[in-house]
Amino acid sequence: MEEIRKYIDENRDRFLEELFDLIRIPSVSAKEENRGDMVKMAEHLKQSLLQAGADKAEVYPTDGHPILYGEKMIDPALPTVLVYGHYDVQPAEPFDLWESNPFEPVVRDGKIYARGADDDKGQLFMHVKAFEMMMRTGTLTCNVKFMVEGEEEIGSVNLGKFCSDHKNMLGADVILVSDTTMIASDIPSITAGLRGLSYMEVEVTGPNRDLHSGLYGGAVANPCNILTKMIASLTDEDNHIAIPGFYDDVIEASPEERREMAKRPYNEEDFKASIDIDAVMGEAGYTTHERLGIRPSLDVNGIWGGYTGEGAKTILPGKAYAKISMRLVPDQDNEKIAKLFEKHFKSIAPAGVRVTVKYLHGGQAYVSPIDTTEYLAAARAMETAFGKKPIPVRSGGSIPIISTFEKILGTKSILLGFGLDSDAIHSPNESYPLYNFYKGIETIPLFYRYYAEMKK
Ligand code: BES
Ligand code: MN
Ligand code: MN
């Protein structure tokens, strides 16, 4: 412990400078213009791994963005930890809402401000530096493998195939992931579940062009009016999702589980204040954390159509669109839900419009057992580093590839996240507290130590 802290203290500034170098590469997976940056990023990380002490590191091209794989095998008899993370980030737009350049990291009030500061460059890099620390101090107790992708934010489109193609290479006892949150910097928690996702795009087409809304309005179906009505009907007055069959596979939490969940520290007034709302809203009969962690949800992510420019233009639009996502819980299947959605959405379209529905991407929910050696080692590491037992928490977010790992590789993941809700991931002014960054680097080697010990 002292040794770890000492190494971190002596290398604090360098760790930060190196993270900043990663952040300065704008690896936005969604954008064609950043294709070159994705390669640059993977190559840069490869060098980081080699410099930290990996025996080998290789960048694998895919049909999309490259995947980085690296490893340090010390003894086949020891347990193997596979670290997963992603080097891609969400687009930084809208730029004008950033207080500083999203790709020029700065520290303000003890936090790193930049796109990817938390999600996931900051959190991924803690693993690279923890690995470096264990190599330099001769304290590595497990074999280590790194798998870092550049497509997490666009649905991990090529990682499933990479896993099936390299099953042996990726063989491990546990997958270790820091890409989630903890309750607060002084309230450690471990993510024991993630929601799944089905992401849809719908298009409603009416007349063959935008029409004069005086000459046609009131006599012709308006795609914007229709689309908003259709969307409104997807949830009922209890905020239940009204798609037939939607809840068929939802596993209801037991009263004990719900009692356990209710024990986590949570203040609804603080929650509301943190996002400036005067009331929460969700499915009747459930608390906020149940709504987030164990119940599915449906959200419009964006909706457009017709005239949205300056001033007024009197038209009846020819088309309207929306992007609609559904967060899923065990045992809902993302593809089955996508089909139910499509069937239902088409069935509620009135005469006078045509509807197309596209499934963009998705994945299954994930549940992590909390009685395994892997979980207990992680919990012990957290407890040593933070001085408090971590609380297992079901998160509302999704990392769809985690359930795919289990299916293809047969390996369970530990979601050891150090982010905070207030880090504003995906939003302008994303940040990551320096405290959490260094605390993560301190916690990770403890996991390796305890895991090797407990696994014997
Ligand atoms: N790291 C997040 C997921 C996350 C954040 C989970 C905080 C739990 C707590 C990840 O990068 C992410 O943004 N996932 C997407 C899904 C993906 C398919 C675009 C999400 O949850 O929207
Ligand atoms: Mn992430
Ligand atoms: Mn993300």
Image: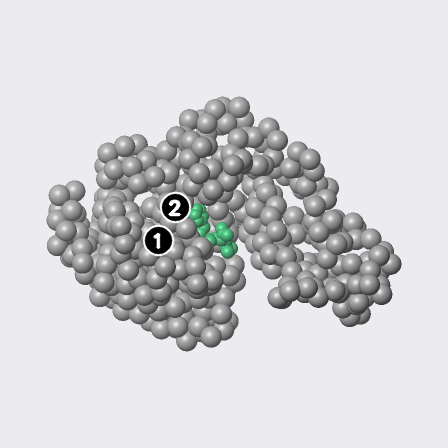
Outermost residue to the right:
219
Crowd class of label 2 (few under 14; some 14 to 19; many from 20; radius 10 Å): some
Look at the image and tell me in which quarter the C terminus lies: top left
Q: Is residue 333 above or below residue 206?
A: above
Q: Where residue 136 sits in the image (x, y, percent)? A: 15, 57
Circles 1 and 2: CB atoms closer than 8 Å? yes
Question: Would you say residue 195 is visible in this rendering?
Answer: yes
Instruction: Identify the secondary structure beneath mark 2.
Output: helix
Query: How far is disc 1 from disc 2 in space, using C-alphas?
Result: 8 Å
Taking the spot 28% from the left edge, 60% from the top edge, the residue there is 106
Q: Secondary structure at mark 1?
A: strand
Q: Residues within 10 Å of mark 1 (few under 14, many from 20)?
A: many
* Lower position in the chain sequence, tag 1 or tag 2: 2
Label 2 amino acid?
Answer: Ser
**What residue is pinned by disc 1?**
431
Question: Which residue occupies 74% across, 64% down?
Answer: 314
Q: Give the residue number, with chain letter if any, for mark 2.
A: 422
Q: Percent position (x, y) of residue 4?
A: 16, 47
- The residue located at (25%, 47%) in the rendering is 435
Q: Is mark 2 within 8 Å of ligand 1?
A: no
Kind of residue at badge 1: Ser
Left or right, 135 with reference to 61: left
